[in-house]
Image (cartoon, rainbow, N blue to C red):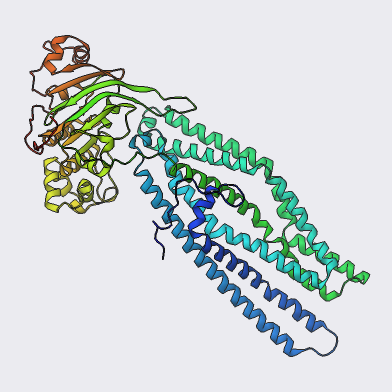
Amino acid sequence: MSTAQDTAPRTQAAPETGTGRAPSPLDVLLEPVRGRVRTAVVLQGLASALGLVPLVCLAETAAALLADGPTDTALVWTLVAVALAGAVAALAAGTASTLVGHLADNDMQLSVRHALARHLGRVPLGWFSGRGSGRVKKVLHDDIEDVHSLVAHTLPDLAAVVAVPVVALTYLALVDWRLTLVAVLPVAAGVLLFARAMAGSMRKMAEYAEAMGAINTAAVEFVDGIQVVKHFNGHHRAHERFTRAADAFADFFVSWSRATTPVTVASFLVLSAPTVTVTVVAAGAGFTALGWSEPVSVVAFALLAPALCAPMNVIGSRVQQIQTARSAAGRVRDLLATPPLPEGSGGGPRGARVVFEDVRFAYPAQDGAEEGEEVLRGVDLVLEPGTVTALVGPSGAGKTTLATLPARFADVTAGSVTVGGADVRDVPAEELYRTVGFVFQDVRLLRETVADNIAMGRPGATRAEVEEAARAARVAERIEALPRGYDSVVGEDADLSGGEAQRVSIARALLADTPVLVLDEATAAVDPVSEAAIQDALSALARGRTVLVIAHRLSTVAGADLIAVMDDGRVVERGTHGELLARGGRYADLWRAQHPDARDAGARDGDVGDGGVRGGGGADGNVRDEPGEDQ
């Protein structure tokens, strides 16, 4: 049996086909399972054809019973046996088709999801912040589900659409060619009406997918921001965006339905079994009266003529499903084509010294712009091993962007970022994340046990090590109070507050034991009690490491070894808390703005004010001076 990796779709350009055209995204997704899909289609076509055998046998039985002279009993019983055999064979072929098709679909979904998971794992982490999670979710779940419908249902159903009319038409033509022409008329009329209803459907399906994507993104944003929406009685941009997206989709769908529904309903009526049956029976009665047809022929047409049209009633939805699957495959292709970060192939860091040298960074251009906005403009900064460096400054100054570069959330546009003397672009990702850890204010815990969430950075950690990290992060007591303690599952029987979840993430970072650590205002959104516990945990976490802290409240980093003040993508000041206050520049202005009543703006150098991360850690604790460290 082929594995998911064996059948994973490739992202590189596919070779051109014999027609001179490159295969479509849908062809690429289906290529690994194409043979089994064809088998499922053939089996379903065979099952549909065999399903007509009982009807044919019934018509022939009627002819045998109504024939002049003695009834051929042996023929009648033979026809009954053939009808039963045909029904059983049709059931067996249909079951086999369903089994083969769903197994092929399962392998296809598994291979595509594995490919997407592997690829998204190599995409810059900063890429995700520029896209709504609803759009990514749509590709990972909804679009793959659309392709599933195509493989497991639509293509086999289309085999029935072809096989049933062909077999029925062949038999009826042998019975009476005149009535066959009459029976074909509703088919021709229904097809013409359907073609008119489907005109421009490709463009409409693309608009439909775009509208659904907008709703998905707006819905996720609306749910994430529901507290703000309720606080302002619904007057919030997330609420307005969701409402606009929903209204736009409703307007589009109503307009599309009004244009297509009358014609579509007319095609269904023309192709319905009662319409076809009444048409052929009426024509058969007339032809019999004129002597053109045999009365028994009408029986065959009454039984089998609806089979000419019945499959056509599903072709509309199946064609739409094909178009939907093509659009979905295109979005999967586009996601797989997202440029990943090049994997580093050099050596690992030789220490914990972090150097930003003439760093420039611009986010990728969007909305047709030739280039993105430059948010970092020539930053030079050195983080010495065992020290705490704080980044402060107004919103939009570039603090978070700069802090994410050592962890390689994105690559610099110009300049370099080195950790332990190695350019982060040259360090293999696994080695880099063993060296650089991060704790952000936006905590993400997986739906796993609390112990597994803590051990994420060190999957092989023992339970004793996990518990020790939890104690150091000041969260052990809360975990032990859970119904199953460390085995409680987040989101099931582990309902943690924001501050508790933050301390779990700190325990995770403690256990990972990375020499370099990035902290992004980990106490910004918690209550004072939780803040005190988190600050204690952060002080334990920072001890002996090279720490870069993003701070909005200056009192939390007053004791840092170095404070870098950023503004407009540049470092405009640097020094200790006391030095910067004495200088009376940008930092002093920020401090006075946050402490307007303070007579002595300068807390003693080395003090943390209200319990922030302490500096002056030196190279003790978890960071060791190794031979060859780039100091």
Q: Residue furthest right?
A: 290
The vertical placement of 40 against 549, above or below, is: below
Residue 597 occupies which quadrant of the picture?
Answer: top left
The vertical placement of 372 against 242, above or below, is: above
Image quadrant where one finds the N terminus:
bottom left
Image quadrant where one finds the C terminus:
top left
Q: Position of residue 78 (x, y in %)?
A: 69, 86
Q: Is residue 621 left or right of residue 413?
A: left
Q: Is residue 598 visible?
A: no
**Which residue is drawn at the image coordinates 41% and 51% (left, top)?**
113
Q: Is residue 304 left or right of residue 503?
A: right
The vertical placement of 94 against 83, above or below, is: above
Please name whichever residue, 276 or 625, is drawn nearer the observer in this view of the structure: 625
**Which residue is drawn at the image coordinates 59% and 76% (left, top)?**
89
Q: Position of residue 31 (x, y in %)?
A: 51, 56
Q: Is residue 140 visible?
A: yes
Q: Position of residue 79 (x, y in %)?
A: 70, 83
The vertical placement of 293 against 330, above or below, is: below
Q: Position of residue 366 (x, y in %)?
A: 45, 28
